[in-house]
């Protein structure tokens, strides 16, 4: 969760402190068991309970205010979870995520547009720390490499509520507003609505709807757009839609597996950001 379009600059936030020693299986299970049912349900759905999980997505980009569809979008993330040794400490969600723009008629992955190269949104890692405070969940996101390692700290909590007795709705709004080099400002709004259903109720028990209002990517020209994706969780790449899996295996194979551990994240942070990072 919490990605920006290809033209977006990283926000200037403080670094996360170094991660504490990670727990062995037994303490981790104990800390998970001590969590509230809603917090445990959120983490389990988003990042799994041990084996890597994936969220696949499809949607589109719409011209504002006309509503004309400009591009399609497809993508996925791959995630794993690390529960802490001590109950109440942050839970770490390690993920990679990538999204491509597609032709609005054919659905083919765009490689260029009006003579401009089209680069996928691609994060070689994000490390998200979750904590519960009262009846809200907070998520801080660490990302970037080299001198641009940054943390997007949660100013507002993720709100959750039950819809009936079988569906937990989790809502995460994001308001982005910060200065860019040269005196401009980066402004955008995003909203994530996750719907987590009790086991046995639906074929796809974990679902998400994402909306964004913000600038078009630089290669697409000037103007504002509405972005919208729907997403659902799968347990293995074999469950990906066939065109998405073909693109992933051909061009984005690294993203089919999440970071193995925090040590891998630290190694990636020492590298160069390059074109693999959303800009």
Image (cartoon, rainbow, N blue to C red):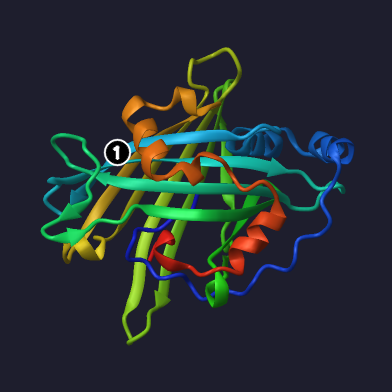
Q: Of 37 and 84, which appears nearest the observer?
A: 84
Q: Quick check: 271 above or below 160?
A: below
**Which corner quadrant of the image does residue 267 belong to?**
bottom right
Q: Is residue 51 visible?
A: yes
Give left or right: position of 21 versus 277: right
What's the residue at 68%, 42% (across, down)?
Answer: 81
Residue farthest to the bottom?
Answer: 182
Position of residue 125 measured from the top left corner of the image (x, y, whole percent):
55, 54
Instruction: Report the residue at 49% width, 44% height from top.
Output: 255
* The quarter of the displayed image where residue 165 is located: top right
State left or right for residue 59 relative to residue 2.
left
User: Residue 64, can we see it?
Assistant: no
Q: Secondary structure at mark 1?
A: strand
What percent of the width, then of the height, locates residue 103? 18, 42
Task: Provide the residue designation for mark 1.
Answer: 59
Q: Tell me where residue 215 appears, x and y as whole percent.
A: 26, 63
């Amino acid at each position: 969760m919490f990605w920006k379009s290809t033209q977006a600059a990283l926000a200037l936030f403080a670094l996360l402190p170094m991660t504490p020693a990670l727990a062995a299986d037994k303490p981790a299970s104990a800390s998970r068991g001590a969590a509230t049912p809603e917090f445990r349900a959120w983490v389990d759905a988003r990042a799994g309970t041990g084996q890597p999980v994936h969220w696949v997505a499809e949607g589109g980009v719409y011209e504002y205010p006309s509503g004309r569809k400009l591009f399609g979008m497809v993508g996925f993330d791959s995630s794993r979870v690390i529960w802490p040794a001590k109950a109440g400490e942050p839970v770490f969600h390690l993920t990679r995520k990538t999204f491509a723009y597609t032709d609005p008629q054919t659905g083919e992955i765009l490689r260029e547009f009006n003579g401009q190269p089209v680069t996928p949104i691609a994060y070689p890692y994000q490390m998200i720390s979750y904590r519960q405070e009262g009846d809200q969940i907070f998520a801080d996101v660490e990302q970037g490499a080299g001198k641009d390692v940054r943390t997007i700290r949660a100013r507002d909590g993720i709100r959750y509520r039950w819809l009936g007795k079988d569906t937990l709705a989790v809502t995460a709004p994001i308001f982005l507003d910060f200065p860019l080099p040269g005196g401009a400002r980066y402004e955008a709004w995003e909203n994530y609505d996750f719907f987590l259903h009790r086991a046995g109720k639906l074929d796809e028990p974990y679902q998400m709807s994402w909306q964004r209002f913000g600038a078009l990517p630089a290669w697409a020209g000037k103007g504002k757009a509405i972005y919208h994706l729907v997403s659902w969780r799968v347990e293995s790449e074999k469950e990906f839609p066939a065109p998405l899996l073909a693109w992933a295996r051909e061009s984005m194979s690294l993203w089919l597996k999440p970071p193995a551990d925090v040590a891998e994240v630290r190694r990636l942070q020492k590298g160069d950001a390059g074109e693999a990072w959303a800009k």
